[in-house]
Image (cartoon, rainbow, N blue to C red):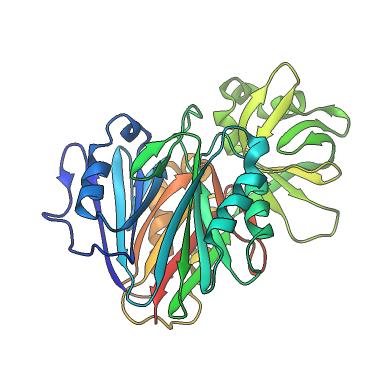
Amino acid sequence: MQLSTFSFDAVRGWSVSAFPPLDSERTLIMVYAAPDYLNTPQPISELCRAYPRARLIGCSTAGEIAGPAVNDGSLSVAVMRFEHSDVTAVSAQIRHASDSHDAGTLLAGQLRRAGLRSVFVLSDGLHVNGSELVKGLASALPVDVTVTGGLAADGDRFQRTWVIRDGKPESGIITAVGLYGERLRITHGSRGGWDSFGPERRITRSSGNILYELDGKPALALYKEYLGERASGLPATGLLFPLSIRKQAGESRQVVRTILSIDESTQALIFAGDVPKGYLAQLMRANFDRLLNGASLAAGQAKGEDKAIGPVLAVAISCVGRRLVLGERIEEETESTLENLPPATQQVGFYSYGEISPYTNGSCDLHNQTMTLTTFSEF
């Protein structure tokens, strides 16, 4: 595999004097960009013209990761030309969260063929139920295919996200890439680092990713009690207090859910993924040191055994809530991932509205408030 990573911003332009000559049918380009490039997509168009045979994917972000740096108003780009592996990109529209499962099934069906090793998916972050998207993908893919990716973001505004389809940024799109070949090496890691607080409550009324009641009480009203003065800033302030859910007491496997929006009329909270009725839910809050340690653990998990020959690309997808909490310390997170990955690993990525990765091993799930890493290499 040949690999080059570089960036763009409106003031300095491209960080390279010329695009690396890596165009081919086996080239995959990833572009993570500030939301406003929906209106000024010229840099994305330049990449399309420079790499006409490549597969180009990407999405809007809440911050672009380029090496150890976290930027705003930029593009973070990775260009991979595989020597022994094939690449296919497909897309689907997503207009309503209720369409998520069917969209995942459709995409998986288009990608499924002999030699499929990994699927990397980027989705509109506001019109999707990430849990159902993942279930749809899993239902139509072999169990040994690794699924990772994330949900596009719009800073902390929650107004408009986009994903690249056929070289153009569009809202309401899911794009998935299938990677095929015996020489591929794909690893992954995902860790959180938040502390639970307050009582664990039973979800007594919900529908998909919409939470109506906890212990028989209106979810939004109860949530506002905990937020106090911060409640006026919802849904953005909800990023600081995610919800941990698990099926039953004593179960160690938990997933974290972040609020995407609220509904005052029904006193409901709308999340990026499912909040099943009967599950237990508990509020969480930030612990600076544990957030940073979580990023290190995710990198260690993704490192695995060093089998790569040549370069390694790490795609870091972390939740916008982590960025808001860590503030000026945010680059400690991206630095810690690089420090725990193989030497000379190149890193790109973005801050998201949801992260898609296996919990540790096994089936994939939607996560919130985690740092997830996917590494790509050949051996």
Q: Is residue 141 left or right of residue 303?
A: right
Q: Give how far across and how far down residue 228 sits, in percent.
A: 66, 24
Q: Residue at x 29, y 42 (%)?
A: 74
Q: Give how far across and how far down residue 243 sits, in percent.
A: 69, 42
- Nearer the observer, 331 or 55: 55
Q: Quadrant of the rendered structure where residue 61 is? A: top left
Q: Quadrant of the rendered structure where residue 294 is? A: bottom right
Q: Is residue 163 left or right of residue 106?
A: left
- Nearer the observer, 156 or 18: 18
* Residue 294 in sight: no
Q: Give how far across and how far down residue 270 sits, in percent.
A: 67, 32
Quadrant in which the C terminus is drawn: bottom left
Q: Give how far across and how far down residue 318 sits, in percent.
A: 49, 50
Quadrant in which the N terminus is drawn: bottom left
In the rendered image, the vertical position of residue 51 relative to residue 213, given as above or below:
below
In the rendered image, the vertical position of residue 376 relative to residue 59, given as above or below:
below
Q: Residue at x 81, y 60 (%)?
A: 251
Q: Is residue 207 left or right of residue 179?
A: right
- Nearer the observer, 56 or 124: 56
Q: Residue at x 59, y 19 (%)?
A: 232
Q: Residue at x 20, y 53 (%)?
A: 50
In the rendered image, the vertical position of residue 20 relative to residue 239, given as above or below:
below
